Amino acid sequence: MGEARTQRSFFDQYLEKLRHVAEIIDLAPEAVEILSKPKRTIIVSLPLKMDNGKTRMFTAYRVQFNDARGPMKGGFRYHPDVNLDEVKTLAALMTLKTAVVNIPCGGAKGGIKCNPKEMSRRELEALTREYAKALAPFIGPDIDVPAPDVNTDAQVMAWFLDEYNKVVGKIVPSAVTGKPLSIGGSRGREGATGRGVFFIGLEAASKLNISLKNARVSIQGFGNVAFNAAKFFYEYGSKIVAVSDSRGGIYNPDGLNIYKVMEVKRKEGSVTKYSEAETISREDPLTVDCDVLIPAALERQITEKNADNVKAKMIIEGGKWSDNS
């Protein structure tokens, strides 16, 4: 038996891809060096009195990778698997994303290691406010502008902004994006990423001579990005055959009514409670028979273990890249 293969870190994979592309485009070594190290890494411990009266400590991160093009930009997420390697890599990718679309911003990312599904609304609000207080000296419209990401939404951004305003002693609506319309948010922001996934699909389909009308679409995830992508494909005439959430997935080769699925998820807590479909695992949407696959959960879902089982003609990444280690 050969020695077990050690999985490379997410950041090591980023560095490998960076160096590979740098060779192709003849990028200066100095630029590669700059894009290989974050400008600032913030790690804080947040105390929170839980509803049971006990105090817990939560580890939170904010990695500000690069601001050469302008104030840094990037979301923050609440998830049990949040770690520094993940946040640092996502911050690096945000730096590249803002540059690729040519907006005058750099890249950052943040997160708190927690399970929001096991926390009350009061606990989530208090934790968000602690996070805002800890980050307040390091963020702002001209420094770093946070946004929602996994398990954070407009309400979380409203709490964060309100606490930030208290700390700095003035109203600064431009300190965050993804906030509610009532406090200066942008129309269309909530569905923007999912809409982008759909438009990318349209463009790719035209190049590959694939019709999205009646195309079978499988989506791993059913959060904000996944649902909005599903909605646009569904309304266009595509057939959504599978979706999933953290508790499992559902599959119907004849197609799902994604509005009814969302109604069930909101009432029952999971898409698996939808009765007009077969229950599958949360990973199965990656390998069901389909024309278009949209991974829109966490990053690194397509690996060397399941890649050969992917049947889709086209993959549109709603999450970050797959793991090719």
Image (spheres, rainbow, N blue to C red):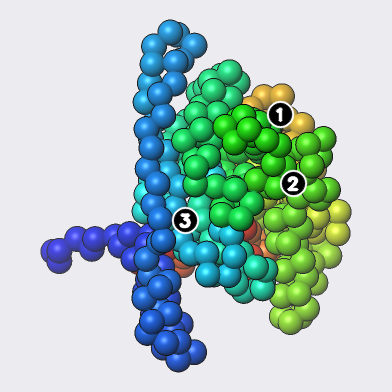
* Position of 302 relative to 96 (above/below): above
* Position of 98 relative to 279 (above/below): below
Q: Position of residue 265 (x, y in %)?
A: 69, 31
Q: Position of residue 73 (x, y in %)?
A: 59, 56
Left or right relative to 29: residue 62: right
* Residue situated in front as seen by the camera: 40 or 93: 40
Q: Secondary structure at mark 1?
A: helix
Q: CA distance from mark 2 to mark 3?
A: 24 Å
The quadrant in which residue 18 appears is: bottom left
Q: Which amino acid type corresponds to the residue marked 3 in the rendered image?
A: Gln
Residue depicted at 72% across the width and 69% down the height: 200
Q: Which residue is mark 1?
A: 266
* Position of 25 relative to 127 (above/below): below
**Could you tell me if the residues under marks 2 and 3 are in contact, i.e. CB atoms within 8 Å?**
no
Query: Which circle's residue, 1 or 2, is located before the other in the chain?
Result: 2
Label number found at residue 190: 2
Residue depicted at 41% across the width and 29% down the height: 46
Label number found at residue 64: 3
Q: Which amino acid type corresponds to the residue marked 2 in the rendered image?
A: Glu
Q: Position of residue 223 (x, y in %)?
A: 65, 42
Query: Which circle's residue, 1 or 3, is located before the other in the chain?
Result: 3
Q: Position of residue 152 (x, y in %)?
A: 60, 38
